[in-house]
Image (spheres, coloured by chain):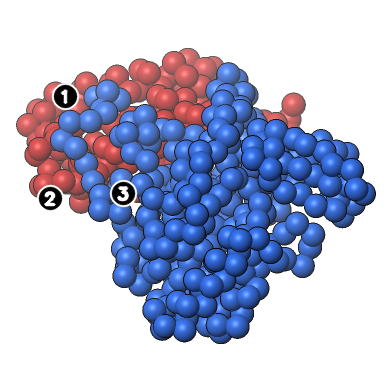
Amino acid sequence: MNETEQKLRNEARTLLEQGRVDCIIGYETGSLKFTTTPLITKDKDDTDRLVINPFVVNNLSVFLSDVDGKAGIVAKGCDSRSIVSLIQDQQVAREDVVIIGVPCSGVIDLDKIEKLIGKDRDELDDIAWDGDKAVVTIGGAKKEFPAKEVLMDDCLSCDMPAPKEYDILLEEVGPLVCDNELSRSRIKELEEMSPEQRWEFWENEFSRCIRCYACRQVCPACFCKRCFVEETEPQWISPLPKWQDNLIFQAVRMIHVAGRCTDCGECQRACPVNIPLRSLSKKMEEIVDELFQYKAGTDKDTPPLMAAYESEEAEDFIR
Amino acid sequence: MNQESEWEPKILGFLCRWCSYAGADLAGTSRKKYPANIRIIKIPCSGRIDPLLIIKALRLGFDGVLVSGCHPGDCHYQTGNYRARRRIAITKKFLEYIGMEPERLQASWVSASEGGKFADVVTDITRDLKEISPNRLFTDERDGTKAAE
């Protein structure tokens, strides 16, 4: 247990003891090696299980709508953006949430580590940050990797590792090692293809989709109580397993969350058939930025993107 | 319908009831000529347009979709067309990114007095769509052609 973790546990316990929150949403150690799992609790003794490490991958803001009363929530920079976005959309009231900002040096992508080392994660003893290097311990020997090689793709384009909106900040954090070019390398590949090739690429990817809707369930921006895919009158997408309808589901989902999506990458991680959904969500974030100079979840006092307008803005496509 | 030159694009038009639909009406009563390729659905306001409606039309096999509303500042509900503009802007860019031809999604501002403009818009869109192939993107036909290869 490190110092930050101890601070976090103390803060969480105090919040519950003083009755400032009804529950705490945080991370605890997962059942598999190098994983964490969400911990939602009303019991102050459970706060001793809270952890902060390079594997706190989930975007916990998705649970805010599920809990009753006031919630204390552990938030990295990206999570705080999602929370702010929910506040903008009036899904959560600012006074109903106590944001415990935690420092984040980026989340480590275990798949990348496994690839680099050529060993299964179960064979590794320890993975930890040392400055901007990830140190992996295997059987007493230590290997160092630069952050760029082991960070999650979405962390590579992170420009807000510390939360801007918070009630408690555990520790200041320096800027992350960023490489936006590397983060969007897949998008660049797609952009260089012809439209037909791109369509074929997505046709191929979405042929695998089993419509489990995990991407939608983990998405804090997807907060509709009833999604269009479940509507039957009219039935927007066919219940038959067709790639066209799989693609429509995802394309419309991406358009619906435009201006709310913070590119947290949870949809891609949740996907059981590894569809590169970030290549869609990240691109959408770029489109929104290019057209409207808008970045989701950065200012709780501005109206949501799609609820606002300027009288003069991009309309060169309109006849 | 074997030859490509005989192919006629099918266009779905979503027209706002206050401006563009009246504009289309005026085109008719003024006996302006425009291609019969467009099928029109009257909507209360261009702000009614959910990108889902556009994509669903393409899925059903329409070759192009036109969304038309009041000029900026003229919306009957003050702001509906501004909201539609944002939505259509991102939808168009996004669909282009996944590989759709940009010509398939069209938008226009047509007021109730612009019957001539409506006829011009439909003529131009039909011409542009004829230059690209029939829409097989989202349709089941695409699977059929693939299987035949």
Chain identifier for the red-coloured part of the image:
B
Q: Label 1 sits on what residue type?
A: Lys
Q: Nearer the viewer, mark 1 or mark 2?
A: 2
- Chain identity of mark 1: B
Q: Secondary structure at mark 2?
A: loop
Q: Label 2 sits on what residue type?
A: Tyr
**Looking at the image, which residue is at 57% across and 71% down?**
A9
The answer to which quarter of the image holds residue B27 is top left
**Looking at the image, which residue is at 41% across and 83% down?**
A19
Q: Label 3 sits on what residue type?
A: Asp
Which residue is at the front of the view, B21 or A80?
A80
Which residue is at the front of the view, B45 or B89?
B89
Question: Residue A131: where, in percent of width, then height?
Answer: 64, 40
Name the N-terminal-most of marks 1 and 2.
2
Identify the residue at the far front of this view: A3
Q: Colour of chain A?
A: blue
Q: In the rendered image, which residue does mark 3 sit on?
A: A299
The answer to which quarter of the image holds residue B24 is top left
- Chain identity of mark 2: B
Question: Residue A154: where, in percent of width, then height?
Answer: 57, 41
Q: What crowding class fits label 2: few (fewer than 14 Cα within 10 Å), some (14-19), or many (20 or more)? A: few
Q: Is residue A115 visible?
A: no
Q: In the rendered image, which residue does mark 2 sit on?
A: B77
Q: Nearer the viewer, mark 2 or mark 3?
A: 3
Picture disc at residue B117: 1
